[in-house]
Each structure stands twice: as C-alpha cells, then as structure tokens.
Image (cartoon, helix red, strand yellow):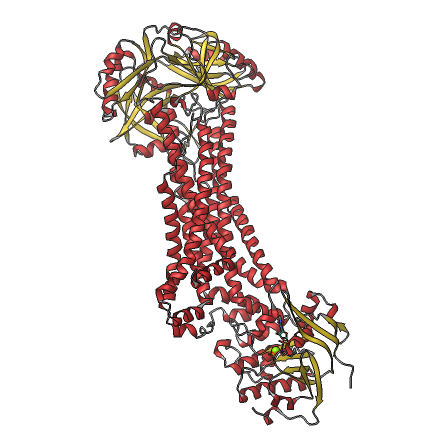
Amino acid sequence: MSALHRKLLRDLMRLWPQALAIALVMAAGAATLILGVGTHGSLAETRAAYYERSRFADVFADLTRAPEVFADEIARIPGVGAVETRISKLALLDLPDMVEPASAMIVSLPDVREQRLDLLHMVRGRPPAAGAEREVVVSRPFADANRFDLGSTFTALINGRERTLEIVGIALSAEFIYAMGPGDLMPDDRRFGVVWMSERALAAAWDLTGAFSTVHLALMRDASEAAVIERLDDLLTRYGGLGAHGRKDQTSHAFLDAELKQLEAMSKILPPIFLVVAAFLVNMTLTRLIALEREQIGLLKALGYSDLAVGRHYLEFVAVIAVVGAALGVGAGTWLGMGMAGIYSDFFHFPFLVFRLDPSVWAVAVGVTLAAALGGAAAAVAGVVRLPPAVAMQPPAPARYRHGVAHRFYRALAVRQTMVMVIRHIGHRPLRSLGSVLGIALAVSVLVGSLWVYGSTELMIDVTFHRSDRQHATIGFARSRGASALADVAALPGVMVTEPFRTIPVKIRHGAVVRRVAISGRARDTDLSRLLDADFRPVVLPETGIALSDMLAKILDVRVGDTVEVELLERDRRRVDVVVTAIITAYLGLGAHMDLAAASRLMREGEELSGVHIAYDPARRDELFARIKRTPVAGFVALQPVALQKYRETLEQNLHIMVSIYAMLGMIIAFGVVYNFARISLSEQGREMASLRVLGLSRGEVSGILLSELAILTLAAQPLGWLLGHVIAGAMVRGLENELYRVPLVILPEVHAWASLVIAVSALASGLVVRRRIDRLDLIEVLKTRE
Amino acid sequence: MDAPIFETRALTKIYRTGAVEVQALRGVDFEATRGEFVVLLGPSGSGKSTFLNIIGGLDRATSGVVRFAEHDLTAMEERELTLYRRDHVGFVFQFYNLVPSLTALENVQLVTEIARAPMRAEEALAVVGLADRLDHFPAQLSGGEQQRVAIARAIAKRPEVLLCDEPTGALDSATGVRVLDALVRVNAELGATTLVITHNAAIREIAHRVVHFGDGRILSTHVNAGRKAPSEISW
Ligand SMILES: Nc1ncnc2c1ncn2[C@@H]1O[C@H](COP(=O)(O)OP(=O)(O)OP(=O)(O)O)[C@@H](O)[C@H]1O
Ligand SMILES: [Mg+2]
C-alpha cells in the first residue's frame, strides 16, 4: 500500500464520525432513490405480470341485456382479440355477525367453457359446479376480513330474493385488485366483496338466460382503443349499452394506477435534497481538512508528488465516503424497498410479488451519490491542485477579522465577548454558515413536507364527511325507480330525513377533453348531502345548468358561464350543451351536479330516482338495517360512519409509515449538518476554547460558545425550513393529485412547531456529542504549541 | 516576611503514556510570599512548566501538597480549580493565545466580564502601554503587542498571582524588555506574586529571587541583593 493510501486510511479512521455522518446523508439519498424507484418498479412489474397472466381485459362495457350470439358480432370489430361476456350485478348481503348490510359484485363464471379473459386466480377450493345455485367463489380479501373459509355460508338478496350461498372456493382477480363498493371512498373488505357464481344459476335468477349484461374485450396489440370503443358503443346502443370504457375508467385499475403514479412522483422529491446536503457537507469538511493539512500538501508537492496526485488523494478520500454511503444506501434502499413493495402488495392483494430491481437503478444511485460527493469536493480539491508548494509550506495568513457594522452595537448593548466571538465566527465564513443554515432548513422542510398531511387529511375528512356528505347512509336502488320510492325509504324504521338523487352516466366534453362521470341530480337546497363553494359554504344549485367539481372544471378547463357538452350514456346517447353554473369544492372524484328537475328534463322522463341519502335515528339503527337486508329496497347501502372509520384507518396506517420515514430522514440530515459544522467549528476554535478555559471560563461557558453558534444557525434555519417545507408540500400535493382524489394544501401552525422541535432535538443531540469533546480539551497541550 | 501565599511540599508529577512513565517532578518544596517576583530557570525538560501548571490549577499533582493562601489545590475539584484560575491567577504564555476574532479591548473584556473585582479593560491596556490600540485585532498587532495584550488580559482581574511561561520566548530583545517592564510594573503596582519561567539568564536580574530547576527538583535558590530594572538588561 502506498504511503498516501495509508494516510487516506488513517484520515478516515481519525475522522470517522464526520465521515459516517456524511455517508449517512448520502445513504439516505441513495436509499430514497432506490426505495422509490424500486418500489414503484416492482409494483408496476408485478401488476403487469398479474394482468398478463390473468388476461386482464382492455375494454369494458355494461348493458341491459344482449343475446349471447351477439358476442360473435362484437368479436368481429377490427382490433378485438378476445371477447368475454358475463352477467354481473350488485347484490345486498346479510353476513352472519354483522349488523350493517354488506354488498357484493356478483359475477358469472362460464359453465361449459373456460374463461377467456379476467381469469380467476384460485387460492383455495374449486369453481362452482355448473348450474349450482348455492355454490360461490368469493374474493380472498372479503373472505379474510370476514373470517370465511370453504364451507362458510352467508345470505344474499339476489334480484330481490334471499339466497343462502356456500363458499366452495376463494380466489383473487386482477380485475378487482382495488375492490370498492358503490358509494364507498376506500376499499372496505368487510363490507364489500366479489362473488362468482355459475352463469346458468345467475342467469336464471336475473332472467338473463342466453344473454349477457357485461362484455369485456382484449385488444390486439396495434388496435385503437378509441375506435373499438366507438364501434362497440354503436353496437350496444340497441341493447341498453351504458358506454364502453378502457382501463383508464376501470375502478380497480384507475386507483392502482393513481397509487403507482403517486409513488413515482414522491420518489423524485427526496433524493435531490439529500444529495445537495451531502455535496455541501463534503465541501465543508474537505475544505477544513485541506486547511489543516496545508503544510503537508506543500511537503508532498515539494517531495515530488504531482499536483494531480495530491488532488486525487483528496478525491479518493471523498470517494471512499461516497462509496460507503452509496453501499449503505443501496442496501437499506433495497431492503426497505422490498419491505415496502411487500406492504403494498399485501394492500393490493397481489397473488405474487415480482421484486425486481433493475441493476441500472443501483448504478444510478451509486452514480449520483458519487457525482454529488465529487461535485462537493471539486472546489476544495481544485484549490489543492493550484496551491504552489512554497506557499503551502508557510503557515496560513492569520485569520483576518474586520469590524462589522454591528461593532458599535455590541459595546452599546454590552454583549458578552463570548457572544461576540460567536457572531464573528459565524460571519467569518459566511458561505459555510449559510450552507449550514440551508442544510438545517432542508431538514426542517422534509419534516414540514411530511407532517402537514395529518392536518390536510383532517380537513379533507371534515369537509367530506362533516360538511359535504353528512348523510348517515346512502341507499342505492338496483335500478332507477319512480318518485314513489322516496316514500318507501321514508317509511323504513328510524329514517328521519330523506334526500333523493338521480345518477346519470354521461360523457362530459369540452374542446378535446372528455371524461366519463355520473351527473348527480339532486334537490336544490339539501341539508345532508351538500355542495360547497371554495370557502366551504353550502351552494344552492342553480335551477339550470350544471355544477362541476373544481377538479373536473380544471381538467375540462372551464369556468362558470362556459358551456360543456354532455353525452348521455343511457338511452338515446343524445348530446346536449349545458352551461356551467357553479364550481364546487370536492377532494374525491370528479363530480357533476344538476337540479333533480333539470336532470329529469335532460333525460326527457319523469322524476326517476337512483337512490336516497338518509339520516336515521341511531337508536333504531339495528332495526333499520335488519329491514334493509330483508326487503328488496336497496341495491346497495353506503354507510358514512363506517366509511369514515375505514378511511381513517387506511390513511393513518399509510401516513404513519411515511411520516416516520420522513422524520427519520430529516433527523439524519439535521444531525449530519450540525455535527459536521460543530466538529469543524471546534477544530477551528478548539485552541481558543482551551485558552478560555485557562483564563478561568468554566466548561459550561466554553461549550456554550459552540452551542450558541449551533443554536443561532438552527434558529436562523427555521423560517427558511418552513418556507422550503411549503414548497415540498406543494410538490407533494401535485404529486398526489390525480383525477380520483386530491389532497388540499393546508399546513397548520403546529406542523411548523413540531418540525422545528424534532430538528432542534436532533441538532442539540449532535451539539451535545461534540460538547463532550470540549469538556475533554487538553488545556496544557495548546499552550505548548503555536497555532 | 509574610506567611507564604504559595507553598508546595514533596510535590511529584508522573506522566504516564501507555507503559512509559516520565517523572516530571520529583518532590518540589517551594514557597513564595505575597508580592514576590520569582524567576524560574532550568534546562529544558527539568519540570518548570509542569510545576507552573500545577500551581496555576491547570494540571494536577501526582502526590504532595499545593497550598494557595488557605486553599489546598490538591483537594480541589475541576470546578473549584476553574474558579481558582478565574479569581486568583493570571497566565501569560509564550504563544499569546489571544482570540483572533476579538479586538485587543475585547480580549481583555473576556476576563473583566467574569472576574470579581476587575479593573477597566482600557486601564489594563494602558498599564501595558497599549491605550491607543484598543480596537485592533490580534492579526493587526506585532508579537510584542500581542504579548502585552495577553499581559493586560492576565492582570485585568487584579490577580493575586501572575504566572508567566517564557513570556519573552518569541520576542526580540527590545520588545522583550517592554514586556518585562510591563510585568515588573504590574508586580509593583498590584502586588501580584509573579513567577516567570525563562531560558534567558539575563532576566534573572530583575527578580527578587531566582529558583533553579533540574531533573524535576529545585536545585538551588538565589536571592538577588539588588534588582535591576528591565531597561537595564538586554540579550
Ligand atoms: N503531557 C505530557 N506527557 C508526558 N510527558 C510530559 C508531558 N508534559 C511534560 N512531560 C515531560 O515532563 C518533563 C518535564 O516537562 P516540562 O514541560 O515541565 O519541562 P520544562 O522544564 O518546562 O521544559 P522546557 O524548558 O523545554 O519548557 C519532560 O521530560 C517532559 O517530556
Ligand atoms: Mg516549559
């Protein structure tokens, strides 16, 4: 080993805490990169494999009823690779040990042929026997949540008739990765499941023998989805088609896709922060090391080492740290990524998980870490290369301090000299001090940028559940019913308030942008389910026109007064121009609302209802639920309190994980920055501190100098950190935003306080670690030597 | 003579570095009275600095007794030693150990802010003849001037003892004389017992008493019949 390499090793061993602190920041950068990219990559890959193996369809369409032979005609549409027809209907369930009604999507399985698309992935048991009326396969999450096993039974209201069903199989399906009940906001596996039955049995129950109510298509590789959808819609008009759509509008796929896009967006926010901080730490530490080794550098050059050899020595020092940091980061990132992918995979109930990390991701992680390190080192090393040996051998010119403008104030205000030392030392190397302030600020910002989500979630919950959708339950009819249905619901036991609504599936279009949404026709001035304006004040629906949710308005790029084109997907597929008369605030979904009478006019029919929002007397809840479960009033029942609880549970679980990771990362940054600053400050001022101890200043007073310096930087960093935190939160809001939901950007005051507190504790901890060194300063040693 | 302000009995100091032991002091018995000006001479490695550091409360004896007035330094805790240095001792070293970020005045104020009955910092600097350089930073002062700031800083607290380890070691003769002059004036005006370590035999002549160190012991003591003023000596 060469002498320079031995020096390198000794330097690293001597400076190991600082080197480690820097390596940890780098590791965090590399880890977040791999975690984000790896988790996203694995999940995307797993989904692709899952879709592929189960032949997940590309185009989906519901209709009223079409004869089975019609499938052949559909198969002849150019670009269609495979056609799968089926019957699928919603049904209310009465589950043992559950007071609330549950519901299920009942889907037919072909009796005589194999499934062509959307193959079931059987986990246990077997498919139902052909024509078996009692036998069902249920989705695994639903079975797990209700502790069902093979042989368990439950009751379903199928087309108004009670049936006892027995579970003969448990399965997963790529079609229902994200299985959400109608009217629900989050998957609730206890209250919503997928139930597969023999086609013949189901057809008999719904009078659909020899017919189908749903068709799924797989497209050929180069087919145009839009063209196929258009053709299919034309064909299905006769059969009560409700408008075909692609995967983009398939609930499960859309939610999964939104999650994956979020993961991808989030994975881009953190790594750059860490790499910037790492580069700065490298710069700060190396600059000091080089200052201390000036004479050695001169000596090496005088001995005949070339400028480049000496420069390379310092680059190698940094490279070793970067390699260690990158290795730690790659290890931690891969491990965390696997864990994270596992958590997500469980959440989505993937039957398998492809954890595949592209080696190129590792290469990128190591590459950017090295680049950040060498970038940070560049300036300092360039100085080494340029330094002429003769100059290096002379002691450096004494640190020049000058009178600042504040000079007079110190005297007037009787500022203690130790404090003057602190202030002048901070001002002496303004770039380093500013860099440290920025580093600490970034640590604060990472915390602000994660902690805000709690307050934001609370606001979302408050707006959604307490101000906007305040009904206790929503009863949805299996098919739309006349106005008299309202009286039926009102007559149910315990029902106190009723608000009818009508849902109309439409395509809404402005310019080139089209979205599939359901217009909700509703009474103009409602009390349970309300529309809110931008200030969360209830909006009275105008008598004419349409009210759009802010997200939909943004997507369509329309304002109040603009006209949108509404294409009815039910009945005659008429296209009507409607004026946007209000924009309302909504965090979930794309909403469009009309006055109930206007909706009826749009449909050119009398008042038809799709369902009723109700408020009930909690004391009579059980009685009400019992009635709903037995009488064929409801096709489904959405329960707001249950939804709220589920929503909280799911979010809190996910948020806790995310916030803990962010908090830990923020603390690593803060510790790394403060520790390195403190060590360098001590290295520069250790001699002065020892001489102050000789003069009779106590340990506390002397370490107070360093701690004050750290405190000032940390304090100064807070406002900047808050500001940057708002920027990060803004970036996260944009990353989280999709057409299914968005998160409001609200940063509550306490978020700043918590972020600052956590970072202050972390800074204090590193300050105290360094303080131990001050306490152990050798007083006599410094007196013997010249600086 | 008065009761001694300093008294050491059978003072020893052993440095242990791994397996190696260095006996720096091998039983030093020493006394100094209030207001005395003592010069310590001796070859390099004879234990002068070690001795000075122990009686200044910077280091601890391995055995023996050190008394300052009625305090027993050997029994003191770290915190008490700090207070002892703060309240009673002024140090001057070969390397001035000024704080580079503070001006001359501020370096002195560093001490006057924490001392019990200090003189004004300006006054201390006037004593060493630097009344017109108050606002200069150490980097803007010559070596002799820096050393005089260090003396001003040492005397500003009105110390009872002034301990100087080779205060002129880094200075030329003329500058050294000015520094010694400052020390003698402080000794006379404040009555601070002053101990000065030096390798410069010429300096012995300004002392009341000269103590010779050798091999960790006091070899001999010599009382000067007539003192010279610093201006009368040179080297
Ligand atoms: N920290 C230490 N560790 C080990 N040995 C030490 C230490 N300090 C001093 N010594 C040893 O103790 C002995 C006395 O040292 P001291 O510094 O007191 O000598 P000195 O008389 O002041 O010498 P000089 O005139 O060169 O300053 C020497 O042998 C020295 O090597
Ligand atoms: Mg010495």
Residue B168 lies, with reference to residue A148, above or below; the image says below
Q: Is residue B132 visible?
A: no
* Picture mark count: 0
What x and y, as percent, mark residue A48? 35, 29
Q: Residue furthest front?
A: A1
Q: At 61% from the left edge and 88% from the top edge, which residue is drawn? A: B201
Residue A576 lies, with reference to residue A666, above or below; the image says above
Residue A137 lies, with reference to residue A539, above or below; the image says above
Question: Quadrant location of residue B61?
Answer: bottom right
If the image is split into quadrants, where does the N terminus of chain A sit? bottom left
What x and y, as percent, mark residue A50? 37, 26
Q: Nearer the viewer, residue A276 or A779?
A: A779
Residue A679 lies, with reference to residue A395, above or below; the image says above
What x and y, as percent, mark residue A377? 39, 59
Give the quadrant of ligand 1: bottom right
Q: At 60% from the left edge and 67% from the top edge, which residue is drawn? A: A778
Q: Is residue A668 visible?
A: yes
Q: Nearer the viewer, residue B232 or A747?
A: B232
What x and y, as percent, mark residue A168? 47, 12
Q: Nearer the viewer, residue A270 or B114?
A: A270
> Is B21 situated left or right of A47 in this image?
right
